[in-house]
Image (tube, grey):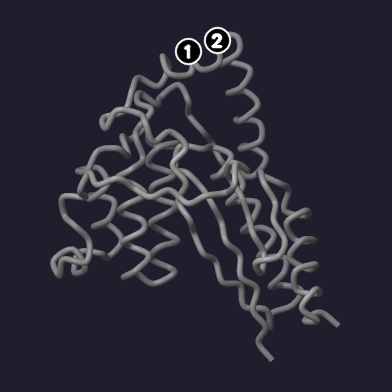
């Protein structure tokens, strides 16, 4: 009998810990499905805009972090910490190449619309590509033309033609999901168990088992 595990994931595209957490989550899901292939995992993605008040065209990346963390040394330490954690899950993050800290309104708006018309596989690839655009290729994901190029590469062209996805990616405010001040990444399992932060795959896997067991679905 197929059993279901719903996982709600709260994220922002500019948060490196969200990308790291996504990798850890996938490793945990793979472990769960290897051990119990009868569990169907349903992922629900929820965009959280960490910096909604940034200018529409973003701000210079280096200057943003210098102001936020207080100096070159603090920035270097923080970036080294993130790179180490990212490397452990097979992710390379090139902070030195990133030019802009973008306003993510348009990226979240686009992804929210894509979730309504795309298949889970399409949306998963789109999510990965937007993360990669920012952290790997240093693209400005606050730029509509960049986002539309990404969108077109994943088979959403017909949806755009039909008006399901606004080709202009309007600048209407994005209504950010609420994590109750817990930050991102934030995970909720079967509406019962929650974890804040980029936890290890083992920790996420254990919580998945607890969520299933609490419903009497693990013997």
Label 1 packing within 10 angstroms: few (<14), some (14-19), many (20+): few
Extreme left residue here?
161
User: Which residue is located at x 63 percent, y 55 percent?
Assistant: 187
Q: Quadrant of residue 39?
A: bottom right
As helix, strand or loop, the secondary structure at mark 2 comes to loop
Position of the C terminus, as image quadrant, is bottom right
Image position, residue 129 (x, y; %): 39, 50
Image position, residue 89 (x, y; %): 64, 44
- Residue 67 got which mark? 1
Report whether 159 appears left or right of 134.
left
**Residue that mark 2 sits on:** 70
Answer above or below: position of 96 versus 138: above
As helix, strand or loop, the secondary structure at mark 1 comes to helix
Extreme right residue here?
219
User: Which residue is located at x 71 percent, y 46 percent?
Assistant: 199
User: Which residue is located at x 40 percent, y 24 percent?
Assistant: 97
User: Which residue is located at x 56 percent, y 41 percent?
Assistant: 91
Q: CA distance from mark 2 to mark 1?
A: 5 Å
Q: Nearer the viewer, residue 179 or 184?
A: 179
Q: Are marks 2 and 1 in contact (CB under 8 Å)?
A: yes
């Amino acid at each position: 009998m197929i059993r279901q595990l719903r996982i709600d994931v709260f994220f922002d595209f500019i948060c490196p810990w969200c990308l790291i957490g996504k990798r850890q989550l996938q490793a945990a899901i793979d472990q769960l499905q290897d051990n119990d292939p009868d569990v169907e995992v349903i992922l629900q993605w929820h965009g959280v805009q960490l910096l909604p008040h940034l200018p529409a065209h973003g701000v210079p990346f280096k200057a943003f972090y210098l102001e936020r963390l207080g100096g070159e040394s603090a920035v270097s330490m923080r970036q080294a910490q993130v790179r180490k954690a990212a490397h452990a899950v097979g992710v390379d993050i090139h902070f030195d190449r990133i030019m802009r800290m973008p306003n993510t309104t348009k990226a979240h708006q686009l992804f929210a619309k894509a979730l309504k018309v795309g298949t889970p596989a399409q949306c998963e690839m789109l999510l990965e590509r937007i993360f990669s655009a920012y952290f790997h290729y240093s693209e400005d994901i606050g730029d509509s033309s960049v986002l539309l190029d990404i969108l077109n590469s994943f088979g959403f062209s017909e949806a755009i033609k039909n008006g399901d996805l606004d080709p202009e990616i309007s600048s209407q405010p994005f209504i950010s999901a609420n994590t109750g001040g817990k930050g991102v990444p934030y995970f909720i399992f079967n509406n019962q168990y929650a974890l804040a932060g980029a936890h290890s795959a083992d920790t996420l896997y254990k919580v998945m088992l607890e969520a299933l067991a609490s419903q009497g679905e693990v013997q």
